[in-house]
Image (spheres, helix red, strand yellow):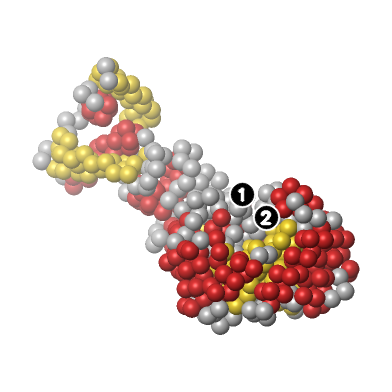
Amino acid sequence: MRTVKIFDTTLRDGEQSPGASMNVDEKLQVAKQLARLGVDIIEAGFAIASPGDFEAIKRISNEVEGPVICSLARAKEADIKSAWEAIKDASKKRIHTFHSTSDIHLKHQFRIDRNEALKRSVNMVRYAKSFTDDVEFSPMDATRTDVGYLCEVVEAVIEAGALTVNIPDTVGYSIPEEFGAMIKEIRQRVKNIHKAVIAVHCHNDLGLATSNSLAAVLNGAGQIECTINGIGERAGNCSMEEVVMAIKTRGDLFNARTNINTEEIMKSSRLITKITGMSVQPNKAIVGANAFAHESGIHQDGLLKEKTTYEIIRPETIGLHKTKFVFGKHSGSNAIRTRLKELGYVLPDDQFMRAMVGYKRIADQKKDMFDEDLEALVSEAVTKVSEVFSLVDMKISAGMHEKPKAMIKLKIKGKDKQKTTTGDGPVDAVYKAIAFLTGTKSRLLKYEVKSITGGTDALGEVMVALEDNGKSMSGHGADTDIIVASAKAYVNALNKLAARKKKNTARL
C-alpha cells in the first residue's frame, strides 16, 4: 500500500480566502497543529508577498519540527531568493515555484509565447535547485493547458531538477473523469516522470475539488495539496479532511494511505474556524456539526443496534467522542429511552409513555430537543398526579391597547367546562379563569419562569407555589409557549392540592 503525501496549504492558499488573514502568532499556532496532525508538507506562505508572511515562514521554519516547510515563489529570482531566506533554517525545506502554461494566461496576463514560458520555468527551477534539492514546480492553469505542451513543460522541469510536479486545477474547471485522464496521460507521455512525484492542487469552483483529487490518486498522483475545512481563494480548495478520510475509509479502492493522525482532524478544523472566523456549514462532510448527527428514528434505532448500519466512519476516528443524536419529531422511542437512560432516568412504561406524549407534542413545535428538554418532560411524567382538573384548551388575546383576555377550557370530573376572563396580564387572566372553573381560592405565593434551552423556540419552564388553607404546594409546567406552561403549572399545583385533600379525608 503506497503512501500519498498531504501538502497543506492552509497558511498560503487558505489564507487568501477573503477575511481569513492570519497574523504571525496565529500562523505559528496553526503550523504547530498541522505538525500534530501529521501533514507531510506545510506551505507556510508566500515569502515575498509581505514582511508578515516572510516573518511567519521564518518562525515556522525555526520552531516547527516534523513536516517539510515550504514557501511559494513565482518563477522570478527575487521570489525564489526570498523564499530561501525564509525557509533556510528549517530542518526539512522546499521551494515551490510556478508559472502559467495555459494559452489564456500566456496571452492575456503574461503576453508571452509558450517557448518563453517554458524557458522561464526551466531556468527558475534550476535557480531554486541551487538553494535546496527539494524543489516543486506548478504549471499554473494546467487543466486549461494543451496537454501536449503541458507534458513538454513537465518533462523539462523534471530534467532541470524538480522532484515534485504539481498539476493545478487553478480555476476549478475540470471534472473527475477528465482530470484523472490527464494525470494518466502525463504518466504515460512524460519519459522521466518516474523521477518526480505527481501532485495535484484542485480548486472547488464547481464543487469537485475533492473528487478531482481522488480521481488523480486513482491514476497515480502521489501528493494532494489541500486545506483544513477546504478554505481558500474563491470557492476554496480541496478539503484535507475529506480526501484523507475518503482514502482511509475506502482503502480497498485506493490501495493507499496517508500519514495523517486522523484523531487531530476535529481539533484542527475548530482551530481554523476560531482563528479565521469562517464557520463550517453544519452539513459539511467530516467536520460539520451534522456529520455524525442522526435524527431519523430508523437511523437511530439501527445505530443503537450496530454502528455500521448508518455510519461509515467512527466519530472517535476524527477526534469526536461519540455519535450525536439530534432529537426532533422524527426520533424514535428506542433512541429517546436510551438517551434518558444515559441521563440517569430509567422509567416504567407508563411514565415513559406519558413523557413520549409530551415529547411528540413539543417536538412538533421545536427544531431540536435538548437533554434539558427531555429532563423537563421526564419531570412532568414522573410527578404526574391523579388529574382532578386537566387543561383541554386555551386562547389568549392581549396587546398594548387591549385588556388581556383568556379563554380556558378544563375537564373536571369528566365534563368540559369553559370560562373567559380578563386580567392585568395574560397570566393573571389565565389564573383567574382557572380559579373560577375549579372553585378554588388558592393564593399564588411564587411564580418563576426560566428558559430551559437557548433560542426563540426554547422550551420554557414555569414553577408556581400555591397556598390553600395554610398548606402550600408547588407545581410546574413546560411548553414552548410560556402562557401555556403557566397554565399547566397552575393546574399541576391544584391537582396536587386536591390529591392531598383526598388523602387527608381518607385518613379521617
Q: Quadrant of residue 141?
A: bottom right
Q: Secondary structure at mark 1?
A: loop
Residue 442 x %, y %: 17, 34
Badge 1, how many Cα within 10 Å: few under 14, some, many 20+?
Answer: some
Residue 495 x %, y %: 27, 39
Badge 2, how many Cα within 10 Å: few under 14, some, many 20+?
Answer: many
Residue drawn at (46%, 53%), measured in percent from left and top? 277
Nearest to the observer: residue 355 or residue 1: 1
Q: Earlier in the sequence, mark 2 or mark 1?
A: 2
Nearest to the observer: residue 214 or residue 136: 136
Q: Secondary structure at mark 2?
A: loop
Look at the picture and state if 254 lies above or below 406: below
Q: CA distance from mark 2 to mark 1?
A: 8 Å
The numbered mark at residue 234 is 1
Question: Is residue 40 visible to us here?
Answer: no
The numbered mark at residue 203 is 2
Q: Quadrant of residue 393?
A: top left
Q: Could you tell me if the residues under marks 2 and 1 are in contact, i.e. CB atoms within 8 Å?
A: yes
Look at the picture and state if 366 lies above or below 391: below
